[in-house]
Every structure is written in structure tokens, then in C-alpha cells.
Image (tube, rainbow, N blue to C red):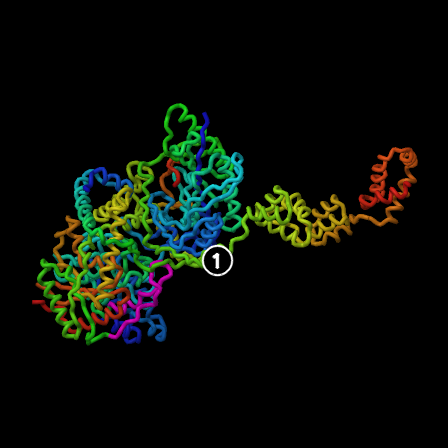
Amino acid sequence: MSGVGTIAESVGSGRSTAASVAHDVAARLTEAASLNATLHWSAAVLDQQAAALDGLSPAERTTRPLAGVPIALKDNMVTTDQPTTCASKILEGYVSPYDATVVTRLRAAGAILASKTNLDEFAMGSSTEHSAFGRVHHPLDASRVPGGSSGGSAALVAAGVVPAALGSETGGSVRQPASFCGVVGVKPTYGRVSRYGLVAFGSSLDQISVFGKTVDDAARVLAVISGHDTRDATSAPLPPLVLDAPRRNLTGFTFGRPREYFPADLHAGVRAGLDRTAQALQDLGATIKDVSLPHARFAVPTYYIVAPAEAAANLARFDGVRYGPRHLGASGDVQGLYRATRGQGFGAEVRRRILIGTYVLSSGYYDAYYRKAQQTRALLAEDFRKVFEEEGVDFLLTPTTPTPAFKAGEKVEDPVAMYLADIFTCAINLAAIPALSLPVGRSEGLPVGAQLVGPMFSEARMLSVASAIEGVVDAVGEVR
Amino acid sequence: MSIRREDVLHVARLAELEVAEEDLPRLVEQMGRIVEFVAQLDEVPAGDSAPPFVAGPAQLTLRPDAVVPSGLVRQPAAFAPEFTKGFFSVPRLGAMAEGE
Amino acid sequence: MSWETVVGLEVHVQLLTRSKMFCGCANRFGDPPNTLICPVCLGLPGALPVPNAEALRLATRAALALGCTVHPTSVFARKNYFYPDLPKGYQISQFDQPLATGGGVTIESPERGRITIGVTRLHVEEDAGKSLHDRLPGRTAIDLNRAGTPLAEIVSEPEIRSPAEARAYLTVLKQLLMYCEISDGNMEEGSLRVDANISIRRPGETQLGTKTEVKNMNSFANVERALIVERDRQIRVVESGERVHQVTMLFNAASGEVRPMRSKEESHDYRYFPDPDLPPLVLSRLWIEQQHAALPELPAARQDRFMSVLGLPPYDAGVLAADRTVADYFEAVVGRGVEPKAASNWVINDAIRAFNETSRFPVSPERLAALVVLVKDGTVSNQAGKRIFAELDQSDETPSGIAERLGLVQVGDADALGAWVDDVLAASPKELERYRGGETKLIGFFTGQVMKKSGGKADPKKIGAVLAAKLK
């Protein structure tokens, strides 16, 4: 299918109609049903959006930067015209009475919201196996997972159903599935995109992020959804992102290769993909430098304190009083209602994280866990700051994931093993800095992703660098 | 620091989560492993210390005191599990259980 | 053997803002249930809080009026507990970094005279919704109109030593909050809510006894009543050899009893942590200073000034300074050149009565000042003045206009008085004879007759001189 820019130009100029785009998307969604990547979509909602767009005057239509562009949304961003379930039984059937800020901005830009995509329940997981509505299948190998938690969005982009999709990140939930599925995934700086209407998981880590078939697809969507929002007190007071022109030469750029991200037991295919990328960067004129992020090994344990603690409080609102299904306990009182609604509504992984989060905040444990984690988090952020500010590094180059897509069932019973799937991504969320993953080849047929990490608010440059790599690296060729 | 059965039951009560008896042993074991895993932070060198991290803007931007429309396209009756005579409702709370 | 009572008070004050603490819903009492709600105060999935600048200004103002130190950085925290009228499952409050700490409230203690009760802290938080147990059969009804209303919580040191002192503290605190236009002080509508911590110990002991928390008191009088009942209960418990248990007691105003609330074992582990949705609140020193400079003269200072500058007795000064509107009104009257004590008498005896009934002053300070001058310079009598005051409420006429219309202007003219005196003396030959025979107290009789003859218009202060001349 065409890219974001091509569709927007075509529909914006009136050479094609939004109705025809909507029709094609409906056909592709039907075709891709076996992936289980979509939780909600309807031809009626697609047609309705297309009709509104086609009804605009030509002058109005040309001002819409995403005119007619179909975009899928992870089902943890609230929409008034389709349900929002977070892949949880506790929100089954819930239709939000308001739109998320990103949804409002996409609508205003002329995008067609194609579908709400499957995820790990409340975005807690790295495989979509924790969805209450069944896992997503990897588009290239149905026995494997697409990564997670934004696996549905990644799979739809990889399968060519939509050119771009929104996911959300807390510890790598867009970059990791982007890497597994062979698409581009961009996690902006914390605060770059409004969180208003994103169902909160770990509020100090959550950031709406973008998948694109190409760097350009992702960049165009990010430009539309970014920018200050007065409804989100953590939103950065900055205008929407202005993109740099794509680059073809990286002379003068320095890329740091943190040794902690290239352990001896790194998957050989992943290592080969990264070597190939480093070579490409040098061919483009850049310098590669080995660097160190000394606290890197503490990232995953820090993350698994901060995120569950915030999640435990964020998920307290799902109590069966104001919205969502209600279950009555045996006791018939309010406490029974709470315990039954929450006990039956939340899946196993969400329950585990609520319990862990409650534990680390509870009386007597706060200092040992939560405070300690927030202090360690500052150390991790400081590691990155030093590399960028004191060692002359423009961007870091790392693997996105330790391995290509793993098999379904491989880690689902072992929470700690699953948590380690975030080992190269979650430090970036903890440090609140931007990063992206782009495909740099395949290993035994499965995509391998390289990660670029930059200082705060360096997205425009980072995307232009990624487009340079994209131009020279064969993203679908075997790496060895 | 290992997790005991009572610890799981205690935090489950705090979090108002029903935990089935048959799930308990596995939960105790899994939480034990997670807590052991995150306890790696004890190995952060003592000399490395920093004030707790704050993500996002360094300070709050406040909202002017103005009444604005609710933005609700549907009213509570459309999404509440129980909504009677303009009220959300729950099983009767005894006066003894009242108030925070 | 005697007991010392130790009380600390936590006062929740709803702040007088237009909109709620973290969203743009109206902050208003009395609307139909669940009509002042939005995604934020309903705790809908995805909604985020953004704090109200005016709420923080009012809280800062309260803190400064209480003499607290307002901190340049404070932090919002989540207080986690489940309750059906708490939409998010946590309350946004402040915990280890509150807005302000360390102030005081000066009161007249019935037992200890003038003392200052320390204020430990003032922090900002959001109110919960309301649970109503009598609206739906077998159900508790939840109204979230109040959810998210901005509150300042003011916590006192445990330095209050009697139920009467607790009441005095609350009276002064409320006065201060209303003076600074922070709160409307309306306890019936819940704008001011009080929780009390109370314990007893032997005089001279430095350790605190086990405290209980008393809730559900809807007036200051009830706070005093409830504390008396709970203090007496604790004394009975301890004197019978038992221990006081740390529980929450609910006061029942109808029965005058306190009884323990069921407490859950976990109820006190609130798992506070900084709210990740809200960056630290940073206030510049300059802004804090500006708020300090913008404070009105506070009641205690004003009372002192009324005494020292205007020469009012302490009682008058206290009554006038207690309410800002009354004090402003009084000062406006004095500002028209009226003698302060005379103005005070009129405001306290006449104007306040109307104010208490209608919450407004029906007579403008200009007109009251004019009336006071009329009485003071003898144009009308004091009694006539009262009649004119009542008339002022009904019309726009000037006091002198009313005096003319009603014929209340006193006659001091010697010729007119002389004529009335002549008539009276001519009509009272027997009394005149007795007077001349030495019965001088009859002068009072003649004065009364002259007043009667004049229809009340004769100036009594001037009758004496005319009479004396004629009687020679």
C-alpha cells in the first residue's frame, strides 16, 4: 500500500477519495483478521469518517496534513466512536464519552481512524499474550509473537493494512514490537505527545508513540500528534514537531555504542544486524565510538518497581462503580463488589503488577523499593546525559531487543524472563529521552531492529538520521 | 526478603483484589521471584546517589480558574453499571463504615 | 486527681474558586446530582488533572494569614484508598512536601487567657464526592458534584487544652478565612469541616496519651459538645483501669453521643507517593511576597487599631473587627467625620441587626453618618434618630429630609421655647406656687410639660435655660 505522504497528497488534492481509502482498509482488515491484531473496527465508522472528509471543500481538504490516511490506534487510547477496552475484561464494552487529545488531533488533520488494535492487557507485557482477547500473531510466522504491548498496531503496519499506527510505550512497548515485526517505531521524549486520553499504566513513563512502515510515515504522524496540551500537566510547553529534511550524509555525526548493550551472549543475528548498521553509518561519514552507561544493568529492576507502583494507583479507578462491568461478590457489600469486579476483571499479569506495585509502596517498604528506584532512575538518566553532553555523542546505537521475535508460550509463565525482553528499551523510558527502532535486516527470516537513542527533544534530527540509514540498509535482506 | 502468603493476602486486601485460594501458591512464588529480582537495586554502589527523578517539566503550569464545558458526549447513565435517579449507586454502606 | 485534655484539630476548608481543583467543572453547591462532572472528576480512563491557579493562590493566602512559611517547592501526592465516592481510588493531596508549615492562631482561652495555638501545616487537596445513604432503598447513592472541589487542610499542633479552646480556635480560624475571602465558612454546606484528635493525660506529663479521632461534627458548638463527651468517656475508661484504643469516633448530634467507627486493619496504609501526573509546584519568592502584601488587615490587628487609634472600648472593637464587612462599614461611617464611639454605638446597636438578618447593610455609610451627626448636634433627639433609621431602610430620602417630613427636628429657638414655657406656667399655677415655695424638683415637671406641649420637638437641653429665666 502507499505511504502516509502519498495518500495525504492524493486525497488532499482530490485525485482520490477518502471513501476509496476507507473501502480498501476495510478489505485489508477483513483479510488480516487471522492476525487477531484488531479488537474493534466497523465499516460504518470508516465510511462515516471518509464521508466527512470527502464532504470538505477542496481548499479545506488540502490543509489537512493526513487527509485520508488510515491510522490504527492501540486500544488504550480513548475514542467516542469505538470501544476502548485496553484488552481487559474490566472495560469490556466501554465506549468513552470523550476523545483522547491525539484522537482529536488526528481527526483534525484528516486522518481516518481505522481500528483499535490488540495489546497486552493495560499495556502490561511484551508479547500480547496477556490480552484478554487472545494474542496477536506475528505476520511472518504465526507461531511467534509480534512483541508487545503494542503488538496489534505493529502487526497491522507490518502486514500492510495501514501505513502508520499509534502505540504507547512504558518500557519499550512500541520499539520492541517494531523490531520484532520489521517496522519503524518512534518513542518521543516524555512530554512531547499529550497523554490526555491514554489510559494510564506508568504515568511517569507512558508516552504515545508511532509505528510507520517507513521513517517518513512515522515522522509525519508524530508531527501531527505532538505539541503542548493544556490538559496534560506533564506535556512539554513546545509547539508541534517540525521535521528536518532527510539526510544522505552523516559526516560530523558521532554515534556511541554502549558496551552494556552488546553483551557476549547477544543473539548472533541481532549482533550482525547492528554491525551492518554501524558499517552503514561509517559509510555515510559518521564516527562510531564505544561508550559506557555504567548503571544500565539496574534499568529493568528499577523499571519493575516504578511502573507497577504507578500502575497500582492508576488501576484503582477500575472499581465497578462508575463504568465498566460490575461483579457482585458473595458478601453483597461494596468491598465484595470491589474485590470481585477487580479480581475477575483483571488478568493474571495485571493482578501480579498491582500486587507488586502495592507491595513496594506499602508501609515499611517504600524507602527500600520506590524511593530507591527513583534515585536509581536519576542515575540512569545521568548516564545518558553525560554521554550526550560530555562525550560528544549525537546518538546511541544499540540493539532494540536481545533476540528476534520469540515463540508464543516461551516466556508467558515466567514473568521475570518476559521482563528481560525490555532490557534494551526500558532505560530510555526511565530517562524520559527519545529513541526509535528501525529494521536493519533479517535473521533466519525474522526482522532485526536497531535502536537510535537521543537526548531530550532531539526527534527531528534523529528521524533525519534514521532516514539516512533507511536509505542504505537492506531492511529485509538476511544479515549473514 | 522473601514474600510470604500473608504478604500477598495483605497487599491483595489493600488493592481490593480477590485472590482465589488455588492461585495463591503460584502467586507467592512468582511475586517472590519478582521481588528478589528488583532487590538487585541493593547493589547500586552506595556512593552513587541522586535526588529522586522527576519526568517531564521541572515545574507545574497552572490552569486559569475558569469553568469550561465538560466535553462529555454521553452522560453517566450511558456508561455506569448502575445509575438511579441521577446517582451512581452501590450496595448500602453501613454508617459504621462511613467516611474517610 | 485531675486530667489534662490534649486536642489537635484538622480543618478542611473548601476554597472559594469558580472551578474545581483539577478540572473546569463549576465549584458550586446545590446543583442536581452528578451534573457538575467531567472526565477528570469522574476519574474516567485517560483523564488527567491540571491544577487551578486560583485555588493555589487562596491556599497560599490562607497560609500567610496564619503566619505559615509558604514553601517555594511543594509536591502533590496520591493518597490511596478505596471508597465509592473517591473516583480515582486515590485522592490527590500533599504529603511530605506540603504548601506551607509552621503558623499559629491566637485565641482568648477561657482558661488560659490569650494564647497562640500552633498550626503544623497547610496543604492543598481535592474533595471527594458525597455518599448519601437515604436516597435509594438498600443502596448508597453517589453524587460526584463535590468531587474535585479544592480544599485546604489546616492541621493544628496538639496544643489545645479544652473543648472550649477548640471552639475558640475554630471561631478565630473561620473569622480569618472569611476575612481573607478564602472560604464562605458555611458549615451546613460543608465548606468548613472539622476532625478532632483528642487524648488525656495527667498534668505535667510530657508524653501524649493514646488519641482518638472524632468526626462528623457540623457546627463549632457540636465540636465542643463532642469533645466534652469524648474526653469524659476517655477519663471513665482510664479511671476504670482500661486502655483507650486508637479509633475513629463518630458524633451523633441528635443523641449527643460518640460511637466508634468500624476500622479496617489496612485503613491507615495510604501508600502515599508523588503524583506522577503533576510536576512539582514551584512558587517564586516574589509571588509569595506579593500575596503577603495583598492580605487585608487581619481581625486581631484591626481590633487593636480600633482601640488604640479610634479609642473604642475592647468590646466595641472586638464586635466591629470580627466581620470584615461590618468593620469596613464602620470605618466608612467614621470616614465621614463621625465621632468613633457614636458611630460604633449606631453600628453595633442598629446596623448589625439588619446585617445579621439580611447579610447586607440597608443604610449606606454616608446616610448613617449623616444621621449620627444629626443626633450628635442635637438636630433630632436620640429617639427620633431611631425612627429615622427605620425610615432610611424604606426610602432614599436623606436623614434630615426624613426629620423634616416627620417633624422631628428639635426646636432650640428661645422665642418658640419661651412661648411654650409661658403657656405651661400659665396652665400650672399650683405647681408654680409650690416651686416658688422651694419645691425645686418641680423643674422636671415643667420640662416634661414643655416637651409635651411642643409635641416632642423642643430640644430638652435648651428648655432648662429658658425655664430658669422665666422662673426667676
Q: Please state which amino acid type lies under the numbered disc 1.
A: Gln
Name above or below for residue A369 compared with residue A189.
Answer: above
Q: Does the magenta segment cover residue A187?
A: no
Q: Residue C224 in the image: x percent, y percent?
A: 49, 35
Task: Kindly identify the residue that appears in the image at 75 percent across and 52 percent down.
Answer: C400
Query: Horizontally, is C194 left or right of B60 in the view?
Result: right
Task: Kindly identify the residue that appears in the image at 29 percent across and 69 percent down.
Answer: A68
Task: Kindly identify the residue that appears in the image at 37 percent across and 36 percent down.
Answer: B97
Q: Which residues are magenta?
A: A218-245
SS majority, magenta: loop
Q: Residue A451 in the image: x percent, y percent?
A: 18, 64
Query: Horizontally, is C185 left or right of A365 in the view?
Result: right
Q: Residue A262 in the image: x percent, y percent?
A: 13, 61
Residue A72 in view of the camera: no
Query: Horizontally, is C352 left or right of A19 in the view?
Result: right
| Residue topped by disc 1 | C290
Q: Quick one: which residue is furthest to the top in this view?
A: C240
Residue B4 in view of the camera: yes
User: Mark 1 packing: few (<14 Cα in 10 Å), some, or many (20+)?
Assistant: few
Q: Residue A275 in the image: x percent, y percent?
A: 11, 67
Q: Is label 1 in a helix, a strand or a loop?
A: helix
Quadrant including the N terminus of chain C: top left
Residue C456: which quarter of the image? top right
